[in-house]
Amino acid sequence: MRPVAAAKLFFVIALCTTYLISVSQIGPAIYESVVANETGFAAGTMIGSISIAALSKEEAVQKVQTKVNEWKTSAQLTLAYQEKTVAIPARLFSFRVEQSVQQAVDGRPSQLVVQLDKEAVSTLAAQLATPALASSLQFDKLVNDITKSAALLQRHREPFDLARYIGQQTTEKIAVSAGSITNLGEQKAEVIAWVDNHPSIEIKGKTVFSLAAYVKGMSSLAMSTIASAVYQAVLPTNFTVVERHTSRSLPDGIPLGYEAKVDGNISDLRVYNPNTTAYTLQFQTVGTGFRVTLYGLPFTYQYVIKMGEVEYFPPKTVVQYNPSLKPGERYVKAAGRQGMLVKVKKETYDESKQLIKTEVISEDFYPPVHAIEVRGLELGTTPTNETETPSSDKAQSNEQTKTPTQEEQPNESDQYEK
């Protein structure tokens, strides 16, 4: 009989233990449910950004649902990447109001349960970023941040920038544009030494970059050579050229339309990076020249730089008479150089290769340099101070931000020949 009695005793003890545990766990929940319905939630009870203190469960559900409906009609959440933005429709969010109220902790903040249509968000992101870029997107983190914003019923906030959800390693590997100077000439040693000491320069997001700070102590021509290559690299991007200058004559080795004069005093090359992420200029020597490559996230649009037809202005000849020369003798004191005018345009294309807009970036004008010829006096003539007035050259600024000084005037005794 002892085994039977022991079994009965064990059964009774197990039953009592189960009862006590059940009462201790279920009892408070039942009590809180009854009390919450009768007296309302305690002070400090929140669901997301909504206070439900002193409300019954039914009243809390009604209040939260009203706030959710208001949010759906006024919320403006967007995805963005560089110049492009796309709205996130409110219909992509599913709010679990009753579940949120059921899970509310009395006297404490609780989360508003929200589910987001991930597939739809992925489709929206694909409208902004290239497939290669979208594949490196930290998508789960993006969805989590959007969901948190909706759970707090934030109506107006800054766009969710896709650039912030792309790994830095991806950014550093993508070359987006480049510029080069193929023949450095007399500046080769100076420029190569600088390139070796400055393999890369970072242009931070939302900042203005000044090149003058990096080329101090160099000759003006060497500074301008480096600046021209940098200008060539940033031109086919969405960067804004804030300051850029040109010379009176196009320096040797610099392509027409790409000169950027820097002298360390007044003239500088400054560009603004409108993107939220940084871009890096990397320099490397190539043969007798050097190359500048811009690394960073790919641009939303494709930018194509086109040079217009070059207009040439032939130089005139300034004649100076020298009585020490025999009649008919002459020599060229200074050779002339023809003037040039070129219009530089930027064309912007979308992902479908459709032209969106065309804008004139600059009109670079280099006035002609007049030749100087010294001649002997002709028999029966005397020197004269009269000059032949040349036809007016195309007058316009040779710089984007500053007007160049006037060209040196010839001596009164000089004469012009066409």
Image (tube, rainbow, N blue to C red):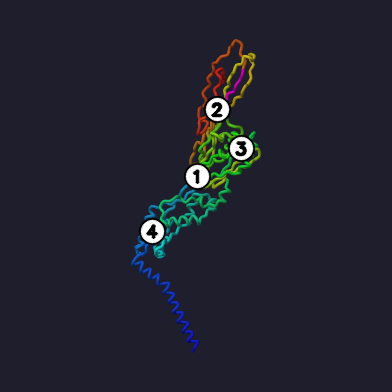
User: In this figure, which residue is indicated by the disc labeled 1?
Assistant: 206
The type of residue carrying mark 3 is Ile
Q: Distance between the residues labelled 2 and 1?
A: 37 Å
Give SS at disc 4.
strand
Pointer 4 with pointer 1, Cβ within 8 A: no
Identity, as a three-letter code, of the amino acid under mark 2:
Pro
State the residue in front, 119 or 387.
Answer: 387
Looking at the rendering, the stretch of residues picked out in magenta corresponds to 369-374
What separation in Å lies between label 4 and label 2 (alpha carbons)? 70 Å
Examine the structure image and report whether residue 372 is included in the region drawn in magenta: yes
Mark 1 or mark 3: whose residue is earlier in sequence: 3
Question: Which quadrant is home to the C terminus?
Answer: top right
* Mark 1 surroundings: few (<14), some (14-19) or many (≥20) residues within 10 A: few
Give me the C-alpha separation between circle 1 and circle 3: 28 Å
The residue identified by callout 4 is: 50
- Marks 2 and 1: which is nearer the front? 1
Q: How crowded is mark 2: few (under 14 residues within 10 Å), some or many (20 or more)?
A: many
Residue drawn where x is 46% and y is 48% of the image: 85
Alpha carbon distance from label 2 to label 3? 23 Å
How far is mark 4 from mark 3, CA to CA?
62 Å
The secondary structure that dominates the magenta segment is: strand
Q: Nearer the viewer, mark 4 or mark 3?
A: 4
If you read the primary sequence from the N terminus, does the residue marked by circle 2 or circle 1 appear first? 1
User: Which circle marks residue 181 in the picture?
Assistant: 3
- Residue under pointer 2: 367
Element type where label 1 sits in the image = loop
Q: Position of residue 190 (x, y in %)?
A: 63, 37
Q: Position of residue 140 (x, y in %)?
A: 50, 57
**Disc nearer the start of the sequence (2/3):** 3
Farthest residue, direction bottom? 1
Q: Quadrant of residue 236?
A: top right
